[in-house]
Amino acid sequence: MARIAIVSLGIVACLHPSLALAERLRARGHRVVLFIQRRENADACARHSFECETFCDHDALAETVMARGLSSPGAAFDLALIESELECEILQILALGVPVVVSDYHCSPEHRPGIPPLSSHRCPDGSLRSSLRAELDWARLLVDRLLGRKWVRRRRRVRVLRRELRLGAEARTVYHHWQPIRFPALPYLHLRAPEFDFVPRACRHGHEGGPLVLTHGGRFQGDAQTEHRLGVIARARASRGLSQYLVYCSLGSLRYDDRFYGVVIELCRRQPEITVILATAAREERLALESCPPNLHLFRAVPQYRVLEMVDAAITAAGIATINECISAGVPMVSYSLGVLDQDGNAARVAYHGLGRRGDLSRDGPEALAAHLHEVTRDPRYRERVRTMQRAYRDHETQGRAVRLLEAVLAGDLAPETVGRGASPSRFSGKR
């Protein structure tokens, strides 16, 4: 039995896959401790009976890990799994002498000729024009990564910390595509489904672990009142007492668009055949003042996967965690990207594979939203394509590669990098 630390930002897109992996590791007999930055999400770890610590920066993380590792004889960590965005935390854990595996949840983290980056809303069609536009998007991303103040500060912080900690070749960094600060001497674990990308190929660098979906619990388990209300909706659904379509709507936990909430409310007023379960985060009270129609059910938060198993379609902000859960539950989507991180690229891939429709958050009104929902619920091809992708996800789940790869690291049998077959070198790679 190994003692494994999982270090996460703690946002839902990262926390849920981390919990799913932690459960699989625990089932194999390993002891897992989670370290997360978002203190408000620590309760989710406790609900899954995991030890959890919160930290505010990389120095606090090092102190917490040391306290945990030295709290009892022989209790030091055998392995740490750390998200790729936490570069300074990776350096601090390396300085403690703990072996590190870097995790990445993005669906398309590498540059491939003719394939747009995750920051782009474009879908490739194989034409010369499409390829040139994709390369232009990559060039824009390259300029942002090299000259943007945020990334300049991050690279400088990593260089300074590496010198302070007196780390050697294991902490060397190179520039690398979507997540530009990369550690080539460390093994990378890509927790994604290659089938969801435009081109279903394995990453050239690192190891494919497959997507991880948390099918129970999560950030919000559901209090008694929420469970009662969802039970009423489920029973009404079972007895065909609800309207024709049941739809789940959530615009994520990072940003919000108040105008679009108004669009959803107006949709329910105009379309009585559509019933919506709307997760509003902290805006439930304000929206409740707008005399909501009876076919709109407001919740501050819901146990998302359970709700997805009830509904005919989902309106999402194109976050990869919610998309993975929709695919796992077999639910077609209408994606409204908020333009945060990888949402534009995720929404493009949903549309490309025919798993749902892609809306325009700034332009769509109730009529456009209703048209999208009618199409994904009435056209059986959307659900069929989602189920095809669902089978690919279940194949990944059955294979359990993520756990086997981590156990290979513990046994000393895993090389830092794996080069996939047929991969071509990228002109965007270079030592930095």
Image (cartoon, rainbow, N blue to C red):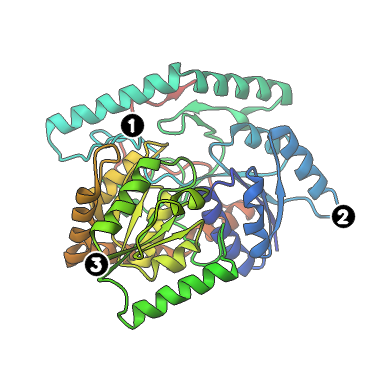
Secondary structure state at the residue bearing disc 1: loop
Q: Which mark is residue 425?
A: 1
Is 46 situated above or below 201?
below
Query: Residue 143: image x %, image y %?
Result: 38, 19
Q: Which mark is residue 273?
A: 3
Bin the neighbour count of mark 2 within 10 Å (Cα to Cα): few under 14, some 14-19, many 20 and up. few
Query: Residue 421: image x %, image y %?
Result: 33, 45
State the CA–CA distance, disc 1 to disc 2.
Answer: 47 Å
User: What residue is drawn where x is 15% and y is 39%?
Assistant: 126
Three-letter amino acid code of the residue under disc 2: Pro
Three-letter amino acid code of the residue under disc 3: Glu
In the drawing, does residue 27 fall left or right of residue 229? right
Q: Which residue is mark 2?
A: 73
Of 158 and 417, the residue lying toward us: 158
Is 144 situated above or below 38?
above
User: What residue is drawn where x is 18% and y is 67%?
Assistant: 380
State the CA–CA distance, disc 1 to disc 3.
Answer: 52 Å
In the drawing, does residue 13 fall left or right of residue 312? right
Question: In front: mark 1 or mark 2?
Answer: 2
Residue 31 visible in the snapshot: no
Question: In front: mark 1 or mark 3?
Answer: 3
Three-letter amino acid code of the residue under disc 1: Pro
Disc on the earlier residue, 1 or 3: 3
Q: Which mark is residue 19?
A: none
Is 351 situated above or below 90?
below
In the drawing, does residue 236 fall left or right of residue 98? left
- Badge 1 vs badge 2, beta-carbon distance below 8 Å: no
In the drawing, does residue 31 fall left or right of residue 288? right
